[in-house]
Amino acid sequence: MANSPFPSDTAAMHATAPVKGLLYLHGFNSASCSPKARLMQRAAEQFGLPCVMPDIPPEPGAGQAAVNAAYLMLCERLALDPADPACDDAIMVIGSSMGGFLATWLVAREAARLEGPAGPSQSVWRQGPRSVLINPAVRPARLVSEWLGSVHANPYTGVTFTVTEEFGPGLLALEAEPVTAQRTLVLLATADETLDVNDAAGLYQGSRLIITPGGDHGFAQLAEYLPAIMAHGGHRLAPATAAAMHVAPD
């Protein structure tokens, strides 16, 4: 288990080529203009990488569709066919909270692809994209009963919505087991006030874990961990440069 935001070169860098694009998935009731999203965009700009950041609706089905559309958009920007195994090493998916839950679903789905660019007759081995999960939600369907009927207003868009019974089966349908653990970096804060850190530590125990004492669910210290995040994607980012990128909460 890692305990430093700056892993050694051996642990952090991969034999594969650096990623060519990032997909950032924000958390529940957040948006693509949130501080963490803007921070990841700044990091991507340091390397000239496209960074697709969709606004994800809170309803599970609509959220799934938005994530899928964003992934296809990034593949198109990189001139890659989603059926091409090259996508696995070209793309890194970064998800915060509910975005981490959706990232796990997306990576598992891509790893399960059985056909290559030539069609069903060509079976290929897939690993799914590399991923970074920040205080990821684990089996959020369990929380629906507690939130049922609650009304929420998005602080960034102003859009309101109500948690309904349909959220439960919708979230259950997106549950996925982590795959290719060595390609998954998980950042956890022990003082997460929203989620139980032990749930994520257990589910992702085979992955690269960085557990930070204290902290919060919003992972306000994210700028300090940008070197580790970008190293997971094969890029070197100086700590001083990362620190200068800090985006204050709104």
Image (cartoon, grey):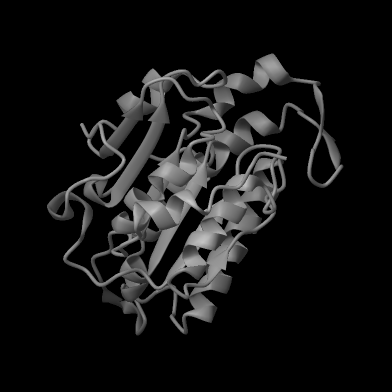
Q: Nearer the viewer, residue 27 or 38?
A: 38
**Residue at coordinates 58% horizontally, 46% vertically from top-left?**
36
In which quadrant is the N terminus drawn? top left
Q: Taking 130 as reference, is 66 left or right?
A: right
Q: Nearer the viewer, residue 11 or 204?
A: 11
Q: Position of residue 70 (x, y in %)?
A: 59, 64
Q: Is residue 43 above or below residue 122?
A: above
**Residue at coordinates 67% horizontally, 53% vertically from top-left?**
32
Residue 83: which quarter of the image? bottom left
Is residue 170 among the parts visible in the rendering?
Answer: yes
Q: Position of residue 139 (x, y in %)?
A: 49, 28
Q: Residue furthest left?
A: 10
Q: Is residue 25 above or below residue 52?
A: above
**Residue at coordinates 13% horizontally, 54% vertically from top-left?**
10
Is residue 178 among the parts visible in the rendering?
Answer: no
Q: Taking 162 as reference, is 176 left or right?
A: left
Q: Nearer the viewer, residue 4 or 120?
A: 4
In which quadrant is the C terminus drawn? top right
**Residue at coordinates 70% horizontally, 50% vertically from top-left?**
62
Q: Position of residue 133 (x, y in %)?
A: 42, 42
Q: Taking 222 as reference, is 206 left or right?
A: left
Q: Taking 59 as reference, is 25 left or right?
A: left
Q: Position of residue 151 (x, y in %)?
A: 83, 26
Query: Count the marks: how many?
Result: 0
Q: Residue furthest top?
A: 146
